[in-house]
């Protein structure tokens, strides 16, 4: 029974991690697949479409990431169970990315950097944390962990989900019926949605125009650490240039790597990071793969199973 590691630039690091975690594992890294029939399990990140369909005895696909859009976009993806990566280390990284960016914009650091460049000593008014609502689109594993971390910093919290939800200290809204009310209370919008047919392209200039305008900050803020396909980058730039949005932190983009010619790179009100909000740690991935394969072999239920019909 062999496991194939496919699609990730870090395949050899993952392979070493798996050997360290369980030396009995047979590992292949794509495209070194001399016997496709021997492959029972796959650890995958953005595999070339059609490649997993060439494995007739595949029993389980483990996603290197928390998101699975990189797998489900393959129309020939075999109909075997897909589990996504849910892990304390990854969650902690996302929490620190979101908290850092909420605080950065709340404290107007993007403008203070501009003042520093101009050698200008100037006080900028700031709201108290309790005067701001952080609204989180997607209150799943990551969104809820971020809410839990932001609460003690004093922010009011709102959240938007597909189905109705109750989360302590978070004012919850659901579905298209709840979206405008959610936006109307949100000063700092944190996007932690999966990319699905329902969420693709959801972050538009029109949507951003519905955000609440905070009393003291120059305008509302967008932080997207979900997926680039959720957003229109042109819409975000238009919204910033029109003063409808104050600032944005973008970790993910419609095209990755972001082309050097893209206007986002040079925009003064955008803090850009290259999809690093929450990397998957290779040792944690290796342990997770070994545990999920063990459950699959024993016929046990698989945690973090993806619902293909929902797309996440
Ligand atoms: P999750 O536990 O599956 O949670 C997804 C949340 O999104 C749920 O609350 C779900 O609502 C909500 N949702 C899904 N479709 C929706 C819709 N059509 N309308 C409203 N809400 C919707 O996922 P997670 O583990 O928190 O991860 C979220 C995403 O973060 C991943 O899919 C991935 O794209 C992204 N991510 C990015 C990085 C990075 O480094 N930038 C790292 C890890 C993950 P329900 O609660 O009603 O189901
Ligand atoms: C990273 O983007 C992930 O989905 O884990």
Image: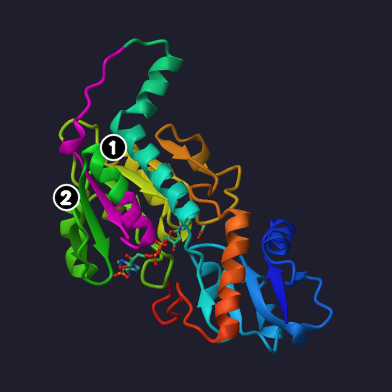
Vertical placement of 25 versus 10: above or below? Answer: below
* Residue at figure coordinates x 36%, y 25% from the top left: 111
**Quadrant occupied by the C terminus:** bottom left
Q: Earlier in the sequence, mark 2 or mark 1?
A: 2
Q: Residue 200 appears in which quarter of the rendering? A: bottom left
Residue 31 position in % (x across, y down): 78, 70
Q: Residue furthest right?
A: 34
Between 61 and 269, the one nearer to me in the picture: 61
Gap between marks 2 and 1 measured at Cα = 18 Å
Vertical placement of 128 versus 164: above or below? Answer: above
* Residue at figure coordinates x 51%, y 42% from the top left: 273
Q: Residue furthest bottom?
A: 56
Q: Bounds of the magenta span?
A: 122-147
* Residue at figure coordinates x 63%, y 70% from the top left: 43
User: Tag 2: Cα neighbours inside 10 Å, few (<14), some, or many (≥20)?
Assistant: many
Disc 1 is placed on an element classified as loop
**Quadrant occupied by the N terminus:** bottom right
In reply to whether residue 131 is colored magenta, the answer given is yes
* Residue at figure coordinates x 42%, y 38% from the top left: 270
Between 279 and 254, the one nearer to me in the picture: 279
Residue 112 appearing in the image? yes
Q: Is mark 1 within 8 Å of ligand 1?
A: no
Q: Is mark 2 within 8 Å of ligand 1?
A: no
Circle 2 residue: 185
Residue 73 appearing in the image? no
Do tag 2 and tag 1 residues touch (Cβ < 8 Å)? no
Q: Residue 118 appears in which quarter of the rendering? A: top left
**Number of marks present in the image shown:** 2
Q: Is residue 122 left or right of residue 18?
A: left
Q: Is residue 155 left or right of residue 299?
A: left
Circle 1 residue: 243
Residue 220 position in % (x across, y down): 26, 41
């Amino acid at each position: 029974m062999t496991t194939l590691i496919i699609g990730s630039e870090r395949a050899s690091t993952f392979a070493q991690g798996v050997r360290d975690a369980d030396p009995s594992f047979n590992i292949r890294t794509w495209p070194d697949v001399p016997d496709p029939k021997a492959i029972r399990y796959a650890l995958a990140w953005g595999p070339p479409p059609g490649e997993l369909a060439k494995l007739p005895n595949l029993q389980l696909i483990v996603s290197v990431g928390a998101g699975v859009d990189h797998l489900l976009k393959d129309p020939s993806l075999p109909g075997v169970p897909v589990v996504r990566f849910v892990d304390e280390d990854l969650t902690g990284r996302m929490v620190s990315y979101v908290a850092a960016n909420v605080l950065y914009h709340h404290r107007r650091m993007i403008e203070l950097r501009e003042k520093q460049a101009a050698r200008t000593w100037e006080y900028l008014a700031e709201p108290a944390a309790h005067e701001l609502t952080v609204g989180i689109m997607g209150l799943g594993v990551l969104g809820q962990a971020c809410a839990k971390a932001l609460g003690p910093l004093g922010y009011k919290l709102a959240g938007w989900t597909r189905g109705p939800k109750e989360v302590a200290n978070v004012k919850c809204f659901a579905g298209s019926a709840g979206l405008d009310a959610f936006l109307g209370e949100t000063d700092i919008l944190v996007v932690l949605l999966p990319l699905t047919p329902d969420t693709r392209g959801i972050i538009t200039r029109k949507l951003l125009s519905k955000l609440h305008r905070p009393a003291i900050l120059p305008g509302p803020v967008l932080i997207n650490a979900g997926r680039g396909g959720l957003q229109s980058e042109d819409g975000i730039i238009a919204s910033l240039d029109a003063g409808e949005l104050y600032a944005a932190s973008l970790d993910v983009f419609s095209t990755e790597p972001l082309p050097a010619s893209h206007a986002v790179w040079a925009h003064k009100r955008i803090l850009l990071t290259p999809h690093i909000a929450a990397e998957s740690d290779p040792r944690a991935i290796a342990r997770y793969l070994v545990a999920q394969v063990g459950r699959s072999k024993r016929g046990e239920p698989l945690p973090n199973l993806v619902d293909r019909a929902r797309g996440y």
